Amino acid sequence: MAGTWIYYLHAIALLLIAVTAETPEQYHVSMDEDSNYRMHWSFNNQDKIMQFTVEVKTTGWIGFGISPYTGQMPGSDVVIGWVDSNGKAYLQDRFANGRTLPALDDNQDYKLISGIEKNGMTTLKFSRKFNTEDPKDLPLEGGTTRLIWAYNNNDPPSQTNIPMHHKMGSRSVNLFNAMPEIDKPKLPDDTKTYDCLAPNVTVPSKHTSYWCVGLKLPQVTEKHHIIKLDPVITKGNEGVVHHMTLFECESDPKWHGYAAECDSQNMPNHLRNCRSGSAMAGWAVGGESITFPAKAGFPIGGKNNPKFAVIEMHYDNPEGKSNIVDSSGYKIYYTKQLRPNDIGVLIMGHLVSPFLIVPNNQMQWNITGYCSGECTSMIFPKNGINIFALFFHTHLAGVALDSRQFRNGKELPLVAENKHYDFNYQELYYMKDEVNMMPGDTMSVTCVYKTKNRTKLTLGGLSTKEEMCLNYVFYYPKIDLSACSTQPAYEALGPYLAKLWRKGILPIPSQNGSAGLYESLGAASLDDPKLIQELANVQTYPPPAMYCAYGNRTMLFDRFGVRMANFKSVANYTMENTTNGGFSISTFSSVMTLAHIVVAFYYLS
C-alpha cells in the first residue's frame, strides 16, 4: 500500500514539473512583417523565470537574442537552436562580441524544454532566469527590451560550425507590461466599429507638422463605451506618421471633416482649443492596439459625454517629400453594454515649452515634471483615481523614463520605469497592479536624455528634433482634468537667462514671443561646467511653476514662482479674451514664454 502511494506521489510530482515546464505563453508577437518568425512568452514572477517559444518558417537553425538597447548584434545575449534530421533538438547559449558567430557561453543558462520540426516549421521552447548573474547574459527588465532574431534554411553541419543567417532583424517588445491575451476581454456581440481617420491629407513638406481634423464620433443617443482602439496607418506611411492623439471635444457636427494645420489661422478657435481638452487615446510609432480592461470603457454618447473629437496627427517628414498622401487614424470599437467605470486620460510631466532645456554634449541629463499635490487636492475625488496603464513619451534624445508617486512627503512604490526607451517603439504600459492616486498626491515624470553628438541646446517643443517629457495616464473614474504639468520656477530661470544674455551666450532674438525664444536658445550651446551645473540647479529649484488644465477650456494656475504682479493679470486677460472663454495649450505656452522674457529682461535692466 505504501508503495502504491509513493508511486502516485511520484507521478503527481512529475506531472507538476511537466505543467510548470510547459506553462502556456500569455503573450505573442510577430518578429517580422510576414509573420515567418513568431515569438510567444510567459513569466513567473515568483520563481523569476521567463519562458519563450519561437516558431519559425524554416527547417534550419534559429537565432534569438537580447540586444544591449541598440537592436544590433555586438554585445547581445544570444541562443542558437535547431532540430536535426533525427528529431533531436539543440540549444546553445552564446554571446556576440561583434558581427561574427557568437561565442559559446561558459554558463549555459538557457534551458531547452522542447523542440520540434513539422510541416516546414521549427519550434523551440526554452526558459531562463530574469537575472542569471552571468556577465554574458543580459538581465530581463521591465520597460522596452530590444530583441534580435535570425534563421538559416539549413541545419548547421556540426555544433561548432554554424553558417551565416539567411534572414535577420530586430524588434522592440514590452516583455513584462503588455496585456496578457487571457486578460483581453472578449468583444460583446453588439460591438460596432467606427473609423476616426484624417482622410486624404497631403502631408506638408516641412520636417514637422501637426494636422488636425474635426470628427463626429458615433452618433448614439444613449451612452456607450469605447472598449478598444486599433491604429490604422496608411500602408507606406509608417515612417511618416509619428504619433496620433484623439481629443474629445464640444463642437457642432457641421465641423466634421474640417482639416488644417493645428495652429494655423485657418483652424477655428473652438477646434484648436479641443487640444487642451481631455485626450481619448494616444498612439506613437511602434505602438499596437489599445485594449481597455473589462472593468472600464471610454464613454461616448448620451448626456454629458463627447459626441465630437479632434484627431491630431504628428507627421515627421525629414526628407521634405511633397507627394505623401495619408489617411491614418483609429478604428474604434464601441458597445452599448456599459462597463462599471468610465476611463479618462491625464497628461502629466513637463510643460511642452522652450524651457525644457537639455545642454549639448551630455551622456545623461535628467528633467523632471510633476503633477502637483496642489492640483490633485483641488480636483481629485475623495477616493482618488485608479491608474491601470500609461504611455511614456519623449523624442529622439530620450533614453529612459520613470514615474514616481509621493504622499505626505513620502515616496510610495515605484509606479513605472523604462530604462531602455526606444523612440521607435512607444507602447502602452499596462500596470500589473493598479495605482491609486489620492487627492494631495504628487506624481513625478523623470526623463533621461542623451545629447552626446549635439552641439546646440535641445529645447522642449513639438518637433522630433526638440523634446518632450510626458506621461499619458489611463485611469478611472474619469474626472474633468486633462493635463497636470510643471516647468522651472520663474524666479530661478529668469536671472539665469539674464546671465546667459549678459555673457553673450544667448543672442538677442530678432523675433518676439515664442519664436524669438526658440531662435535665441536654439542657437546657443553650453560648454562651461559651472553654467551647466547652474542650469541643473535651476531646473530643480523648488517650487516649480505649476498648472492644471481643468475642463475643456479652463486653465487653473495654482502656483507661480515669479514675484511679478502683472503676470497673473496677463494670464487672466488672455483667459478672459480668448474665444469661448478659454485658451489652448499653445496659447498658454506663449503666455508662459512672454512671462519668461519679461522676467529675463527685468533682471537685465
Image (spheres, rainbow, N blue to C red):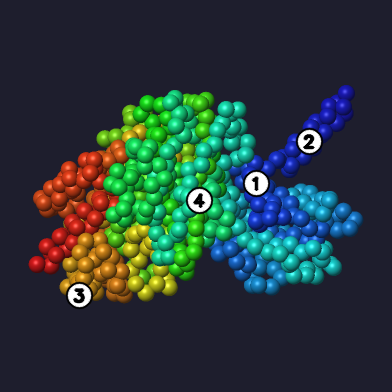
User: Which of pointers 4 and 1 lies earlier in the amino acid sequence?
Assistant: 1
Label 4: how many Cα within 10 Å (few below 14, some 14–19, many 20+): many
Residue 32 position in % (x across, y down): 66, 57
| Pointer 3 residue | 503
| Badge 1 amino acid | His
The image's mark for residue 15 is 2
In the displayed structure, 56 sits above or below 504; it is above
- Distance from disc 4 to disc 1, alpha carbons, whole Å, reads 25 Å
User: Which of pointers 4 and 3 lies earlier in the amino acid sequence?
Assistant: 4
Mark 1 lies on a secondary structure that is strand
Label 2: how many Cα within 10 Å (few below 14, some 14–19, many 20+): few
User: Which of pointers 3 and 2 lies earlier in the amino acid sequence?
Assistant: 2
In depth, the one of 406 and 60 nearer the eye is 60
- Distance from disc 2 to disc 4, alpha carbons, whole Å, reads 50 Å
| Pointer 1 residue | 28
Q: Disc 2 or disc 4, which is closer to the eye? A: 4
| Badge 2 amino acid | Leu
- Distance from disc 4 to disc 3, alpha carbons, whole Å, reads 48 Å
Residue drawn 23% across the image and 72% down it: 506
Q: Disc 3 or disc 2, which is closer to the eye? A: 3
Label 1: how many Cα within 10 Å (few below 14, some 14–19, many 20+): some
The quarter of the picture where residue 178 lies is top right
Q: In this view of the protein, can residue 436 be seen by the observer?
A: no
Q: Are marks 4 and 1 in contact (CB under 8 Å)?
A: no
